[in-house]
Amino acid sequence: MMKTIFINDLLKDELVGKEVSVKGWVYRKREFKDKIFIVLRDSTNIIQAIVRKEDVPREVWEKALEFQIEGSLEVKGILKKDPRAPTGYEIAVKDIVVYDYGQPFPIKGDEDIDTIQKLRHLWIRNRRFTATMKIKHSLLKHLRNWFIDGGWWEIHPPILVGNAAEETTTLFEVNYFGKKAYLSQSAQLYLEALIYSLEKVFSLTPSFRAEKSRTRRHLHEYWHFEIEAAWYHLEDLIKVTEESLKYAIEKTIEERKIELNMLGRDISYLKKVIEEPWISMKYKEAIDILQSKGVNIEYGQDLGADEERELTKDFEVPIFITYYPREMKAFYMYEIGDGTVKNFDLLAPEGYGEIIGGSEREWRYNILKKKIEEWGLNKLKVIIGDMEVGAYDWYLDLRKYGSIPHSGWGLGLERLLMWVAKLGHIRDTLPFPRLREGWLYP
Ligand code: NSS
């Protein structure tokens, strides 16, 4: 029978003294001579159930004895209030419906990372991870709502693609009926094609990166939330970024207090992030600050995880780093003529670093064409029937028929979550993360 009552529905004074029943899994169990405590878990919470030998038929007592951790059952009994119980209420059990007694659960809590990986399909039931998934759900829900309410259109770009959106060195190759295709790194170029009709668009897609680097913040597959808007300049983009993220974080705090507390995240800190203006500085200033801190970095070098950590650890709010040197960034960014481009990376504070990369796009045909040549991308071809066309011809076409200024960005959902929930490793932002070695199981 379908489940209609959840544990959270039971934690109410008006139900005390009434007969209740609830389905779930054994979270903890303690046996005494004359009573057994079963803490039951479901998707919403935990509740203690007590089986008293003298109060139940022998077969109910024997069922309770047989359950393993994670065994599945329905308990029926009278709801009591008990301040000693983990969530303040307790069910005095009268009957038990057995679904599966379960076998001894292989995860005890002190396993090493390889063992946990082998058991990940079971590990993901733990309460901290469940809380993390709920926070992720809320962040995405509110971020999406902010854009939908603001008149942006959600669109669905392809994942199998014929050309790179970012560095070709991080492409995953796929055999597409004997031809080379790739897994998408970013929906950006497709979003750009859609602004001419829908003007303000966004998408949520998996993005794939065959990164060489093995860090705490790199996945090979992540969820990419990307926006693109006609007529927007860099300043407009930055404004939208700060507003939408503050909104998503604010609503998430309201909705996920319990979960954030469970993860030990200080909510008053997150409130400050919402209330205070975020910081913006040019790449050049960031290099100056780093050099003044004694970091060995020159103008023109990329900010790696270490530099980003150094830069952000003393700040309490996110930082927009703008106007990078053109050579450091992708070919599609708008050049302002002094060797820099109109872009930003948004760095999360507390050492977390980049969570968004965005820019105003190069919309002048001639300049974009030259950059595609300079980047060597004009050599890439695709076959249509018996025609060979440049892989970026379609993208250049967008600058030939009513080109306009436009801007957009991509946010790594797992990066945002990692910071908001203050997680130590990006692998715990996804149930089945794709990392190197052995991480295709399960
Ligand atoms: O490479 S990005 O910086 N930028 C783009 O892909 C643009 N084409 C997006 C756009 O303008 N529509 O990636 C964007 C974000 C970056 O800031 C991270 O938050 C995230 O995507 N990202 C990653 N998250 C997890 N793991 C990996 N490997 C990763 N790479 C990027």
Image (cartoon, rainbow, N blue to C red):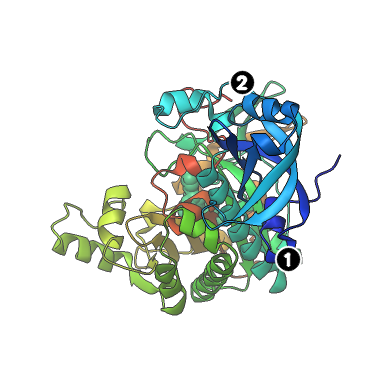
- Mark 2 vs ligand 1: CB under 8 Å? no
Question: Assess mark 1: CB under 8 A from ligand 1?
Answer: no
Q: Nearer the viewer, residue 199 or 129?
A: 129
Q: Position of residue 172 (x, y in %)?
A: 55, 31
The residue that appears at 47% across and 59% down in the rendered structure is 261
For the residues bearing labels 1 and 2, Cβ distance under 8 angstroms:
no
* Residue 345 versus residue 77 in the image, above or below: below
Q: Nearer the viewer, residue 431 or 95?
A: 95
Quadrant position of residue 430: top right
Would residue 405 appear left or right of 100 to someone viewing this image? left
**Farthest residue, direction right:** 1
Name the image quarter holding the N terminus: top right
Q: Nearer the viewer, mark 1 or mark 2?
A: 1
Rendered position, 196 above or below 26: below
**Residue type marked 2:** Gln
Measure how far apart labels 1 and 2 are at the Cα level. Answer: 37 Å
Mark 2 secondary-structure assignment:
loop
Give residue 103's mark: 2
Q: Residue at x 61, y 20 (%)?
A: 103
Would you call the spot at circle 2 few (<14 residues within 10 Å), some (14-19), or many (20 or more)?
Answer: few
Relative to the observer, which residue lies in front, 375 or 276?
Answer: 276
Give the quadrant of the C terminus: top right
Residue 368 visible in this rendered orientation of the protein: no
Indicate whether 200 appears above or below 187.
below
Q: Along the polypeptide, which appears first: circle 1 or circle 2?
A: 1
Q: Which of the pair 177/385 is nearer the observer?
A: 177
> Identity of the amino acid at label 1?
Glu
Residue under circle 1?
A: 14
Task: State left or right for residue 280 relative to residue 263.
Answer: left
Quadrant of res 16: bottom right
For this orientation, the residue located farthest to the front is 54
Determine if residue 383 is in view.
yes
